[in-house]
């Protein structure tokens, strides 16, 4: 192909490329509820550093340590870098490639007349060839496949970045929940120790009464059994505390020996007051939704890539070089050559069409995943709101249960000392009091963890795909 012919083809190539470029894809519309099922909620508040709402000075340093040291988060960051590099490779294919080369060849016929496979022969047994040049090649993107491959790479990079953000949000929520578990089991152990002390005091009273003939051996055995049960429960709670501390250290990415936690007052942990905003705002506040949207965009681009593989491809090439048979004369001969190659698939046993169909099916799969991510997000918020409201009501009644249990134990102990009531009544009130105290801690833990779940469901301060979107430079 002569240079004028190539120049005449270039406008047509550019026109075909522009016509083949598809309009930008937009995510499918999704029905958004007007309000949350739990009823009207306060206006939206910023959720940055949401863990500070629990008013515990130990929680914020733990969050930062998890961000720095958690191995899963480090691996996710490395995957983001891999996706960025792969996106850069795909974007580079949109531009012409330029290569420089130097070739030197020395050939000498040692014996014989020569043959067609070599360039030397009997009368000219020695040959030297040198060349230096630049070679350029460019695939004309008639059908938008090259551009679509670049878009797919960027979308995959974005999805990887959002996946890392989702993992970080899950990690921070897990650290907060694990810390609350540890604090609660410590509080339960303290209550168990206090009840054990009470049970031992009652055991001393029963022993005194039994020695004086005012209590039977059965009563003494019953109280001793209660003390043994309290000790068993205390040891179980201490075991749970050790396991909770180990789980927290694992989330931090540190050996458990490096985790030193001061004993806190679980009762002073605050339930944060969180404004959830409107349901429509949630779509821009969850990194998992942004991840599903980016994966869908990548799949849409992959469909166009698969389609372009079934169509003809045109590649243009150009070389500018110098050459000679002697190195000293290398720049004496200057030349160029231009060319092009048009390739079209004819027969491939349906492999290209099957690949196109597979990419379409993949797009439909990710479309369903995108819709599911949105539905799951709405359900997560409604569930957290419902749990919070329900646990608030349960805590209100549990406070009354605890008050009555404390009064009943005090009255039963007084009456037993005075001989006006049996040990069985005192044993029942002891068990009821301990159970009420333990239930109060458990319910409060569930309420605090419901707040963690709500923060996670709202995106935990993650602000919009537009602000976190990586770009190819």
Image: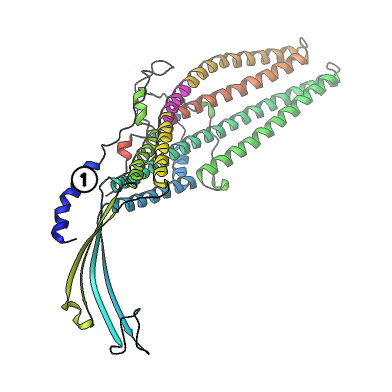
Which residue is rendered at x = 53% and y = 30% of the image? 265
195 with respect to 42 (left or right): right
Q: Nearer the viewer, residue 327 or 353?
A: 353
444 with respect to 232 (left or right): left
Quarter of the image where one finds residue 355? top left
- Quarter in which the N terminus is drawn: bottom left
Give, as a single range, the part of the protein colored magenta: 372-385
The x and y percentages for residue 340 are: 24, 58
Residue found farthest to the top: 420
The x and y percentages for residue 397 are: 56, 14
468 with respect to 178 (left or right): left
Q: Which residue is mark 1?
A: 16
Q: Nearer the viewer, residue 185 or 291?
A: 291
Which residue is rendered at x = 53% and y = 47% of the image? 254
| Picture mark count | 1
Which residue is rendered at x = 64% and y = 15% of the image? 405
The x and y percentages for residue 83 are: 38, 48
Q: Nearer the viewer, residue 371 or 250?
A: 371
Quarter of the image where one finds residue 163? top left
Predominant SS along the magenta part = helix
Question: Is 341 situated above or below 303?
Answer: below
The x and y percentages for residue 5 are: 15, 57
- Residue 260 in view: no
- Residue 36 in view: yes
Which residue is rendered at x = 44% and y = 38% of the image? 60
Question: Is 164 situated above or below 269?
Answer: below
Magenta segment includes 445 = no
């Amino acid at each position: 192909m002569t240079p004028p012919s190539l120049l005449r083809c270039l406008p047509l190539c550019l026109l075909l490329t522009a016509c083949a470029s598809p309009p930008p894809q937009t995510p499918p519309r999704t029905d958004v509820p007007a309000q949350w099922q739990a009823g009207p909620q306060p206006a939206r508040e910023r959720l940055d550093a949401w863990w500070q709402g629990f008013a515990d000075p130990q929680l914020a340093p733990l969050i930062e340590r998890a961000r720095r040291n958690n191995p899963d988060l480090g691996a996710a960051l490395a995957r983001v870098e891999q996706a960025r590099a792969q996106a850069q490779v795909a974007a580079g294919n949109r531009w012409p490639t330029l290569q420089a080369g130097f070739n030197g060849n020395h050939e000498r016929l040692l014996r014989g007349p020569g043959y067609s496979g070599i360039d030397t022969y009997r009368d000219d047994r020695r040959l030297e060839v040198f060349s230096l040049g630049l070679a350029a090649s460019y695939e004309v993107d008639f059908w938008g496949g090259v551009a679509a491959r670049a878009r797919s790479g960027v979308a995959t990079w974005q999805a990887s970045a959002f996946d890392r953000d989702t993992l970080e949000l899950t990690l921070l929520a897990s650290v907060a929940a694990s810390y609350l578990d540890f604090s609660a089991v410590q509080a339960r152990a303290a209550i168990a120790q206090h009840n054990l002390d009470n049970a031992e005091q009652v055991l001393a009273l029963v022993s005194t009464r039994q020695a004086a003939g005012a209590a039977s051996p059965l009563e003494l055995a019953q109280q001793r059994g209660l003390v043994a049960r309290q000790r068993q429960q205390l040891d179980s709670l201490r075991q749970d505390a050790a396991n909770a501390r180990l789980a927290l250290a694992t989330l931090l990415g540190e050996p458990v020996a490096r985790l030193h936690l001061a004993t806190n007052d679980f009762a002073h942990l605050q339930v944060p007051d969180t404004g959830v905003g409107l349901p429509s705002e949630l779509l821009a506040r969850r990194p998992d939704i942004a991840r599903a949207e980016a994966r869908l965009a990548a799949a849409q681009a992959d469909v166009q890539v698969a389609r372009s593989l079934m169509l003809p491809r045109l590649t243009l090439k150009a070389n500018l070089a110098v050459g000679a048979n002697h190195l000293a004369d290398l720049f004496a001969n200057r030349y160029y050559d231009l060319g092009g190659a048009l390739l079209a698939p004819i027969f491939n046993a349906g492999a290209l069409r099957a690949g196109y169909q597979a990419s379409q099916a993949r797009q439909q799969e990710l479309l369903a995943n995108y819709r599911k991510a949105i539905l799951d997000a709405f359900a997560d918020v409604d569930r957290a709101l419902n749990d919070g409201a329900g646990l608030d009501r349960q805590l209100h009644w549990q406070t009354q249960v605890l008050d009555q249990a404390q009064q009943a134990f005090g009255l039963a102990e007084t009456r037993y000392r005075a001989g006006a009531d049996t040990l069985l009544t005192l044993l029942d009130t002891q068990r009821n009091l301990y159970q009420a105290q333990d239930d109060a801690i458990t319910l409060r833990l569930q309420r605090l963890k419901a707040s963690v779940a709500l923060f996670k469901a709202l995106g935990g301060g993650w602000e919009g795909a537009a602000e976190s979107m990586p770009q190819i430079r």
